[in-house]
Image (cartoon, rainbow, N blue to C red):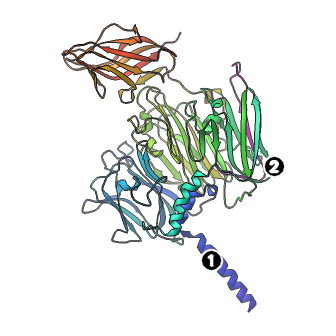
Amino acid sequence: MKRVLLFIAISSLFLSSNAQKKQISMTTELNKLANISDLPAYLDETRVTQTSSYDTTGNNDDGFSGKYSFVRKNPDGSLVIFEAKGNGVINRIWTPTPNNDTLDFYFEGSVKPNYSICFSDLFTGKVYPFIAPLTGNELGGYFSYVPIPFKNGCKITSRGKKMEFYQIQQRTYPANYQVKSFSGNLDSREISALNAVSENWNKVASFKGKSIHTENLLRNGDSITIADLNKGGRITGIRLHHADSFRGLNKSMQIRITWDDEDHPAVFMPVADFFGYAFGKESMQSLLLGSADNTNYCYFPMPFGSKAKIELLYLQKVGMRTDPVKISADVYFSEKQYEPLKEGKFYAFWNPEKKTTPGQPHLFLAGKGKGHYVGTILQAQGLTPGMTLFFEGDDVTTVDGKLTIHGTGSEDYFNGGWYALLDRWDRKMSLPLHGSLDYSLPYARTGGYRLFISDKMPFSKEIRHTIEHGPENNNKPGDYTSIAFYYASKSINEGQQKLPDYNLNKIYVPDTLMVYPQLMQYTISGGIKIEGSVFHCTNGGEVKIDLSDLPKGNYKLYADMEKSPDGAEIQIWQRQKLMSKAISFYAEKRESAPNSFLSNLVLDDFKNAITIHIKRDVAKSIVNIHRLILIKNHP
């Protein structure tokens, strides 16, 4: 009898534990966002997939016309924009084109909506629980990471007749998981879990445990070790002070992290790239990685079995004069043991592709093994001067041999939208989980980052994660440098990792730079009206155009201009010095005049602008410049 009772007790305990493990609700999904320490943990039996408006023909109509922006149309013209069978959770919704149409959510095969909301109110913060920091809009994109769990299927219908760009991402769960479908009416546990997200994010830089502090001078060709641990545990934080010491076009300082005497480092790349610098300057300030208050920080949890070593190396081109760099570093760690059956170790794959391959996408990560993908940093530099059309490329993810995600554009992947438009994707901007590293039309470059926390992408056998460069057929050449962050039992990209050297590290600076009206910084004097690329001035006036972001040097200045019967006459000045002869925008009929020479000019510490003087003439008062082109003179 005692044996029977003991068996029943043990069985009950096992069943209770197993049932608890398989409970999925809004609370469990919010906990994934709040508990950063769980990021290394495997999520077995799940898969992250996405429904989006991408052009299935391979062209670039990823939402413009709405042709591919629905799963199917209902007889009444409403649009089914998402449909999934089985159990799961919607963990990300993104769009750059929200509208005021109602979205209806159907769970568990219901014929009536279980929840309805105005599409735009997923992001405004007006409707609870869709509130910051899990929802918002910035950089042209509208995003929501509020989890929407569902049992036995989910369908989302828009009552509107047109949808444009969107992405809806979900994690699937097995049929034997017990799922509580979303209702919008949160219970006390769900409210506490939602509040815990912002509370925990605000404390992510608070450390418990031990730390190692290092102060040293690092000279060219040397290395220093800032942590060398010989007992299992986990790194909980890294801080490198004097972040401005790692600036520059050569990215000479490298970071190398090795676990358990593995043959290949888990991390080996320029310090600047690892911490999210943009083209030689600090930029990223994400939840887990970046630079703030002149300190580089990393808060990714990093478990290891028995040994951990973190080094800094100074690699500079032979013959170049270099000064030693003062290193001040703190490494935080705990003795919580690595559990190899339950979690992976941290790895970062650095891929500097100095010239992208025509017809082939840029590779974020590819390899075989078990793990999950947790983050991306990308610096993207166009090799053709002009508009950043390379950023039209879509991200594509294949997991275990199946296509799981196909995006709608590069800034879309980073939760943004509408590059080159004012107050959209037009500058650097950091949010907790995503952001823009930079945006410059003159340099034809940009970059972004994204962390995958609740939406970390598991793979059991293999993963291939890429991004295109160009709207179609990977047809825009670029200089792409990316870092892919993931957890696994061992590196899945052995043999692919390039070793840092001077040529791979050096940042490309183009000789031809283009300045476009939509993001032009200018000051006006006189009665000038500006509409897009057109300056209208009947009484004479000046337009001073700021060029302070461009490299110093001697340039030839050209313009793509449009001449017309009402075209004005101008002169180019720098401060009080006339730089050009009279330049006429007059023509008997409207005509384009591309690549028209305007003047020579010099950019230095004191002269970093040009001023266009427009001649007073009531009948001839229009200056139409589509873009300025500066070509650097070399001695």
Q: Earlier in the sequence, mark 2 or mark 1?
A: 1
Please tell me in which quadrant of the rendered image residue 273 appears: top right
Near-viewer residue (364 or 293): 293
Measured as percent of width and height from the top left, residue 87 is found at: 48, 67
Q: Secondary structure at mark 2?
A: loop
Q: Is 491 left, or right, of 117 in this rendering?
A: right
Picture layout, residue 148 above or below residue 536 = below
Label 1 is placed on what type of residue? Ser
Q: Disc 2 to disc 1, how far (Cα)?
A: 38 Å
Residue at the image point whose x is 43% and y is 32% from the top: 388
Measured as percent of width and height from the top left, residue 164 is found at: 33, 49
Q: Would you say residue 125 sits in the magenta stretch?
A: no
Mark sitting on residue 16? 1
Measured as percent of width and height from the top left, residue 443 is found at: 47, 27
Residue at the image point whose x is 66% and y is 77% from the top: 14
Q: Would you say residue 309 sits in the magenta stretch?
A: yes
Label 2 is placed on what type of residue? Asn
Mark 1: few, some, or many residues within 10 Å (few <14, many ≥20)?
few
**Numbered label tally:** 2
Q: Is 46 left, or right, of 17 in this rendering?
A: left
Check whether the beta carbons of the residues at disc 2 and disc 1 lie within 8 A of each other.
Answer: no
Picture layout, residue 344 above or below residue 258 = below
Measured as percent of width and height from the top left, residue 106 is found at: 38, 67
Q: Secondary structure at mark 1?
A: helix
Mark 2: few, some, or many residues within 10 Å (few <14, many ≥20)?
few
The residue at which mark 2 appears reads as 230
The quadrant in which the N terminus is found is bottom right
- Magenta span covers which residues? 300-323
